Amino acid sequence: MSYKIGILGYGNLAKGCELSIMQNPDMELVAVFTRRDPSTVTIQTEGAKVDSADNIENYKDQIDVLIICGGSATDLPEMTPKYSKMFNCIDSFDTHANIPVHFKNVDDAAKASSHTSLISAGWDPGMFSLTRLYSNCVLPEGKDYTFWGKGVSQGHSDAIRRVEGVKNGKQYTIPVPEALDAVRSGSEPELTTRQKHTRECFVVAEEGADKAKIEKTIKEMPNYFADYDTTVHFISEEEFNANHSGMNHGGFVFRSGTTGKNGENKHIIEYSLKLDSNPEFTGSVLVAYARAIARLASNGDYGCKTVFDIAPALLSPLTGEEIRAHLL
Amino acid sequence: MSYKIGILGYGNLAKGCELSIMQNPDMELVAVFTRRDPSTVTIQTEGAKVDSADNIENYKDQIDVLIICGGSATDLPEMTPKYSKMFNCIDSFDTHANIPVHFKNVDDAAKASSHTSLISAGWDPGMFSLTRLYSNCVLPEGKDYTFWGKGVSQGHSDAIRRVEGVKNGKQYTIPVPEALDAVRSGSEPELTTRQKHTRECFVVAEEGADKAKIEKTIKEMPNYFADYDTTVHFISEEEFNANHSGMNHGGFVFRSGTTGKNGENKHIIEYSLKLDSNPEFTGSVLVAYARAIARLASNGDYGCKTVFDIAPALLSPLTGEEIRAHLL
């Protein structure tokens, strides 16, 4: 038997999910649903359909889990509750402050219709969240640190591209090496925003644009850049296309804690990711969790879940005997 | 309410568990059970009892989880099934080849008496196993690497101390830096045993002992040292006591994998531990899992479990709302 998967959307994350399904012999892509004209969308999976999102309800009995690939700002808050009435769903909702509301909306919809949905899967939230939780449980006295990068921030790249005179732009978030070293030492440093990350921007300016003004506008942009040491490089379109079209990312999660009667013994837990393709890795996490969600749903364990609620064995295509023999 | 814990044994690991219970306000140590004369054992927890292991059955209704601190060679294979008939139990069984048999024996005992027991908790097996499982699920195409150290191997230190003419000895397992770098590069190297770890021994020789012979015996010892580049340092008893009485350990787990239609994108997951005190960290893991096991047992989810079967949220003293708000 195989798990039958639907994907809503066909942007970078959806394409990452599709590629991941191809790596998992027990997973089958049934259809990609799009809000565009389906005839304009060509997917890579032989035998899978492309259909309009308007027709999605027709697939209610053909799909075990629907992976919703939309934006956290406006798409997912509306879509995941809506589709949790028809399907077991997975999303990668990452607007941290709105997780409680989103959780409740999805939970209500899923429970009322006997479905199981997972929100906020991926690597942060996702694999990083798991590391934070496990590490806090085993080292209750200590301090957490999360660093992002080196990698491309879509939000910051978008912000650059909105600046007048900018034709194209990409922003890399970079952890400060001295800050990483200080955390690894176990000294539990207090680090400001500026001490943790730097931001490096590569900008293609429009012809005749005022580069000094662009640089100043970027560096002083509130929330995005003002609190950071930011470097702006102006480059040609050719160089931009040749060297800055990737979607690499990654980061580090640390727990620095102590044990002993007087906290005399230090312990450092470090988890890091170096990802050539952020959307393909994120898609791979979503697909692994699709397996778990299908299993929970078939056991009648309905409602909204997060990665915290899923026993790790449920993610694996292997049996309990196999994982105990090979991975324990 | 608090979780009522018993500890069987009072060696280094048991003392680590006791200290961890003190760090967790929702945990209470009820009693330490010993095979020695209880009047010779002094524990650190006010109000907790020390009693003979022979009287343990009297505590059946006073203890939620019994943490069994014994050796994997002979103690745990007998003790964990035996006590799983009376208590929910946790052990740190780490003889890899015998896990299937141990699992079955504990599972049979626990199910027959409506108890829940967890085997093989700690950091390897334990936290490292979790990293291997999660990483294999999200990167199904790739390669696993586990390195241990730098840290003290009890088994290898014991082996040194059994050599004729050796008064005291300690062995450090050290990952080879070039091997770590090769794995981090994503090249997925094939590494021999010798290429992954070196072994460094600090030996106090008995007066008049033949040091050359001791060194040769250690270096050629099959299974323990013969397959490694081993260094032997002879030091004084004073130096040994001053610098080599710690129980630090740690290690690294990597998953190096690829995604993309032709595996063109590389991803590296790295998890590492740097531990000042191996028994205190291991004890902290066991205590966190005691919380989860008590919860599973009170939900009627009986039988033998491993870390793979436990949803991460069950380890935490926080509510679902709290962990979603602070750690997701």
Image (spheres, coloured by chain):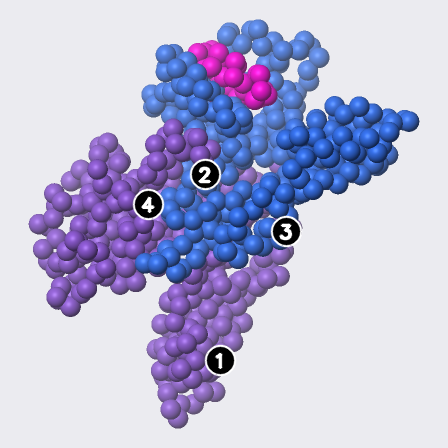
Chain colours: A purple, B blue
> Residue sitting at 15 percent across and 66 percent down?
A36
> Residue sitting at 57 percent across and 63 percent down?
A176
Residue mark closest to the camera, 4 vs 1? 4
Callout 2: chain: B
Residue located beneath label 4 in the image = A288
Q: Is residue B227 left or right of residue A119?
A: right
Secondary element type, mark 4: helix
Which quadrant holds residue B42?
top right
Range of residues picked out in magenta:
B60-87
For residue B200, say whether it is visible: yes
Mark number, residue B130: 2
Front in this rendered view, residue B57 or A5? A5
* B72 within the magenta span: yes
Return the x and y of residue B293 as percentages of the image width and height: 43, 25
Q: CA distance from mark 4 to mark 1?
A: 39 Å
> Residue sitting at 38 percent across and 12 percent down?
B113
- Kindly identify the amino acid type of the residue bearing the numbered disc 1: His
Are the two marked residues, 2 and 3, in contact with CB atoms closer than 8 angstroms?
no
User: Badge 1: how crowded within 10 Å, few (<14), some, or many (20+)?
Assistant: few
Are the two marked residues, 2 and 4, in contact with CB atoms closer than 8 angstroms?
no
* A191 within the magenta span: no
Q: Is residue B168 left or right of residue A326?
A: right
Residue mark closest to the camera, 1 vs 3? 3
